[in-house]
Image (cartoon, grey):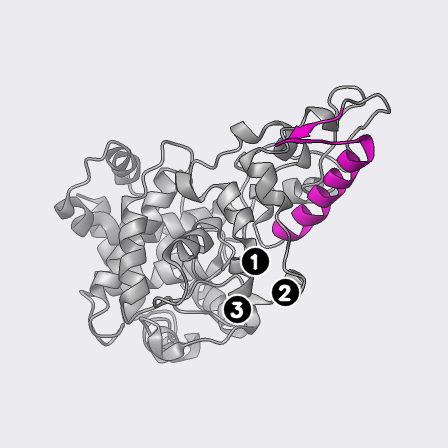
Amino acid sequence: MSALFPADEDIYSDHEEDYDDEDYGDYDGDGDLEMTDDSPGEQRGSQKFTHQELLDLNNRVEKNLKIKWSKIPIFMRKSTHDILFNAALLRYTFIDPDLQLPFYFRNYNTIAKSNFMAEKGVTQHFDITRAIFYYGIDELHCFSRRSHHVRYNIILMAFAWTSGFDTKYCKAGCENFVKAYIKAWIEGLVFEHEMIDTRERDAFFGEWKTGPFDLYFFTDGYAKTMRARLRAHRERFTALGTSPLVSDFLLTLKNGELSDAAFEENGAALAFQWAMSYIADANGTQAVKNKEHAERGGSAGWIEEGSKTLGEVEWDGDLVNAVLEDIDPTLPDPESIKMNKREVDWAGAWITRDQIFRTILKPEEEVGAQSPEVDMMAEMMAKMMST
């Protein structure tokens, strides 16, 4: 893992989603699926498709995918080619098996009716809530380090934990919520490329759905303020480097050997380090990759001439059927739904605005070069690294 603050990178980038350069699937260029005049028809149930019907089905797939992919982060999108011909291979290791793409596409209308946002309480089905978190379509309610809301909440949660959940720095009674979210977030990082383990995330859903607390939403203005305040204290954290415990901690998690005592001792500091270091990791080559992906047509699929035909598609397959399910025409254009315009329950957040910007990360003119709160975090981190 790299040092916390590489000198040549702006780790305080305030993109809504900072995609890194991890390989989550192939990206295919723009173009049309090849359909030759002598392509065979296809049986779907008891129905035999004509040449024109196959073309119509393909057009429906393309049209529906354009809409159904719209809120899913670009790095997760698959090509139309893969949807049609490699459906059995399309699985996300970091998403629960029962929430894979067939579930999402089949339940698109229900998800869209909630404006692609997770909801507390019993009105929104539990599995719909889980899917929204896992797919990262609600930038506040997810586990993705690519969301600045998540990163900033993790940093502040680590601070609150370090303080012993002093009510000067967070709301009373938020300890269980904070620890449950940090555990869920860490679990998502650890198992992103490996066998799925969702115990901590599922435990968090129960805590969040029925509990009183929620994550803090940063409006555009306050996100910029948060970035500036963190930058102001940059040197204090730069000196810390990266804990040698990180790799051992990661291995312990992967092996399922994390004890409650170890998590209590090191969880806050490690979460803080990971949030900071992944900000740096996210700002490197992915910007180039996203540009190349956009130039190739995003998730649009292509097939080399003569390699595949629409007659070979398993049109009755689970994934293709889910894509073909009609989209409710009364739903608004998903691009018109802006997450930063959402209604926010400020009273439900686990921390207040004043605690963030008037107590923990004070304006620089008030504290000068020093901040007792930031010093406390730095000293705790340094102590952990020396043990």
Say left or right for 366 vs 74: left
Residue 51 quadrant = top right
Tag on residue 331? 2
Query: Does the CB distance between marks 2 and 3 fall below 8 Å?
Result: no
Q: Secondary structure at mark 2?
A: loop
Crowd rating for badge 2 (residues with CA inside 10 Å; few <14, some 14–19, many 20+): few
Q: Is residue 109 above or below residue 60?
A: below
Q: Residue at x 38, y 75 (%)?
A: 362
Which residue type does callout 1 highlight? Asn
- Seen at 15% across and 47% down, the residue is 260
- Residue 58 lies in magenta, yes or no? yes
Q: Can residue 111 be seen from the camera position used here?
A: yes
Q: Dot 3, how many residues are within 10 Å of its Cα: few (below 14), some (14-19), or many (20+)?
A: some
Q: Which residues are magenta?
A: 41-68
- Spatial separation of the CA atoms under disc 2 and disc 1: 8 Å
CB atoms at circles 2 and 1 under 8 Å apart? yes
**Identity, as a three-letter code, of the amino acid under mark 2:** Leu
Q: Which residue is mark 1?
A: 109
Other-residue count near label 1 (Cα within 10 Å), few / some / many at <14 / 14–19 / ≥20: many
The overriding secondary structure of the stretch rendered in magenta is helix
| Front residue of 371 and 63 | 63
Q: What residue type is disc 3 on? A: Lys
**Quarter of the image with the C terminus in it:** top left
Which image quadrant is residue 257 in? top left
Instruction: Give the percent coordinates (x, y) of residue 231.
Output: 46, 62
Q: Which mark is residue 68?
A: none
- Mark 3 = which residue? 224
Q: Is residue 182 left or right of residue 164?
A: right
Mark 1 → mark 3, Cα distance in angstroms: 34 Å
Task: Measure the C-alpha gap from mark 2 to mark 3.
Answer: 32 Å
